[in-house]
Amino acid sequence: MTNRQMRETDAAEALLDSIPMPPSAQLLGWHIVAADPTRGWIRIGFDGKRAFLNPAGLIQGGLQTAMLDDTMGPAVWIRTGGELYTATIDMHVSFLAPARPGQLFGEGQVVQLGRTIAFMEARLLDGDGHVLARANASARLMHAARALG
């Protein structure tokens, strides 16, 4: 990671630390890995815990969906300097490969940022960089002070 990328990631992390971490994010082992606020791009690490497994021994799809959702919202948050909060309107997920226990990564990006709606996309990867799931979503934008106040 370059010095500029480290500074951008540190700035995004400080911005995300300005709000309390939700219990759901704590459960997922959510932690920021890298970010580019100018592009509205973020990489989040997650813990693929054994407690998340379905009877087949794979991470349950609903939990993968939560990881993707918890990647896209923060992409908007850092892109807007913490001014706008997202409320997901709709989300489409495609599961491409089995998700096994271990370290997982979500990469999210703002596709288009309007005045009241954001369009976002994300992908969930395993530790080897294989894409496990993809998502795209739209979200209502709210001023953070109103949404979190």
Image (tube, grey):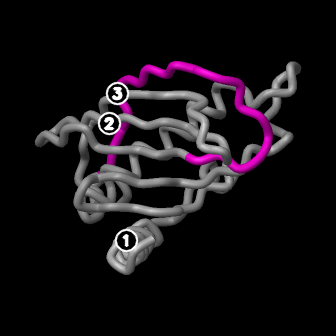
Nearest the viewer among 18 and 75 is 75
Q: Position of residue 106 (x, y in %)?
A: 53, 45
Q: Position of residue 115 (x, y in %)?
A: 11, 42
Q: Quadrant of residue 65?
A: top right
On the rendered structure, is 115 left or right of 26? left
Label 3 sits on residue? 89
Label 1 sits on residue? 5
**Residue 51 appearing in the image:** yes
Q: Is residue 41 positioned above or below 68 on the image?
A: below
Question: What amino acid type is highlighted by mark number 2?
Answer: Met
Q: Is residue 42 positioned above or below 6 on the image?
A: above
Residue 120: which numbered mark, if any?
2
- Tell me how far mark 3 sits from mark 1, CA to CA: 31 Å
Q: Earlier in the sequence, mark 3 or mark 1?
A: 1
Q: Earlier in the sequence, mark 2 or mark 3?
A: 3
- Residue 137 belongs to the span the image colors magenta: no
- Tell me how far mark 1 sits from mark 2, CA to CA: 21 Å
On the rendered structure, is 82 left or right of 10? left
Q: Which residues are magenta?
A: 85-105
